[in-house]
Image (cartoon, helix red, strand yellow):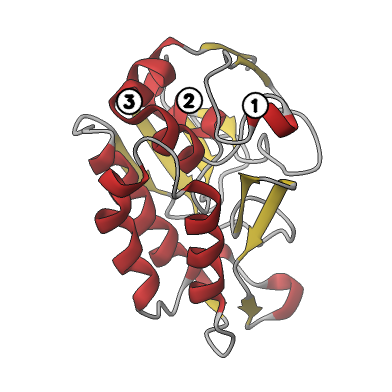
Amino acid sequence: MNPVLLSIAYFPPVSWMAVAVQSGKIALEIHETYPKQTFRNRCNIATASGILSLSIPVKRINGNHTKTLNIHIDNSKNWQLMHWRSIETAYNKTPYFLYYRDLLEPIFSRDYEFLVDFDTVLLECILKALKIKTIKILYTTEYEMKPDFYDLRNSFHPKYQHRNFRCILPRYIQAFEELQGFIPDLSIIDLLFNLGPDALPYLSGADISIQK
């Protein structure tokens, strides 16, 4: 797969990670005007009651004209503790939660000023958990209207299906599948905690087709 231009993401969706894994070279857009209500500051996890959306509180220092790289995290709210407790409650009985817990939990014990930095640290941890050392990550230096990479900056959104590409994600066993049925394309941590080392082959084998 050719290099891909993606948005930043908080514990990205499985399809986002599948694209990144199969591309091997991604660029993250940080010079866009920051859009609200996207995966840039939220992720979806599975609970006994259904999908739970975890959203990082942010501050736009320049209002609606704030660039993604300038988005501040609002650490006046105790969101880190609430998010980790939600993750722990949802996944503490999955096969691999304890295996990856020590890698991920410490990140939620400190404050990060910028959303880009926090998302980057989480992405690096996910790549470490997946034992991936070959993905090359770049960051945009300006906003390009016609990038050389496949442009999937706005293809992932909590409220609508993928744009510009198709991604077929096979079923895997989930913690609350007996209650909710299989829920595709949740946060990458859902795949990681449930499949462990088999998460990488799953991502590598996902059926992806990108339209230019």
Q: Position of residue 141 (x, y in %)?
A: 42, 55
The reply, left or right, for residue 198 in relation to residue 48 is left
What residue is disc 2 on?
A: 19
- Residue 82 drawn above or below residue 188: below
Identity, as a three-letter code, of the amino acid under mark 1: Pro
Q: Can you name the residue that lies furthest to the right here?
A: 159
- Residue 158 drawn above or below residue 35: above
Residue count near mark 2 (Cα–Cα under 10 Å), binned few <14, some 14–19, many ≥20: many
The residue nearer to you, when weighing 145 against 150, is 150
Q: Earlier in the sequence, mark 2 or mark 3?
A: 2
Asked whether the beta carbons under mark 1 and mark 3 sit within 8 Å of each other, the answer is no
What residue is disc 3 on?
A: 24
Q: Alpha carbon of mark 1 to alpha carbon of mark 3: how far?
A: 23 Å
Identity, as a three-letter code, of the amino acid under mark 2: Val
Q: Earlier in the sequence, mark 2 or mark 1?
A: 2
Residue count near mark 3 (Cα–Cα under 10 Å), binned few <14, some 14–19, many ≥20: some
The residue nearer to you, when weighing 77 against 154, is 77
Q: Residue at x 72, y 33 (%)?
A: 179
Q: Alpha carbon of mark 2 to alpha carbon of mark 1: how far?
A: 15 Å
Quarter of the image with the N terminus in it: top left
Identity, as a three-letter code, of the amino acid under mark 3: Gly
Q: Residue at x 27, y 40 (%)?
A: 129
What residue is disc 1 on?
A: 184
Give the SS element for disc 2.
helix
> For residue 110, what is the image quadrant?
bottom left
Q: Position of residue 98 (x, y in %)?
A: 30, 48
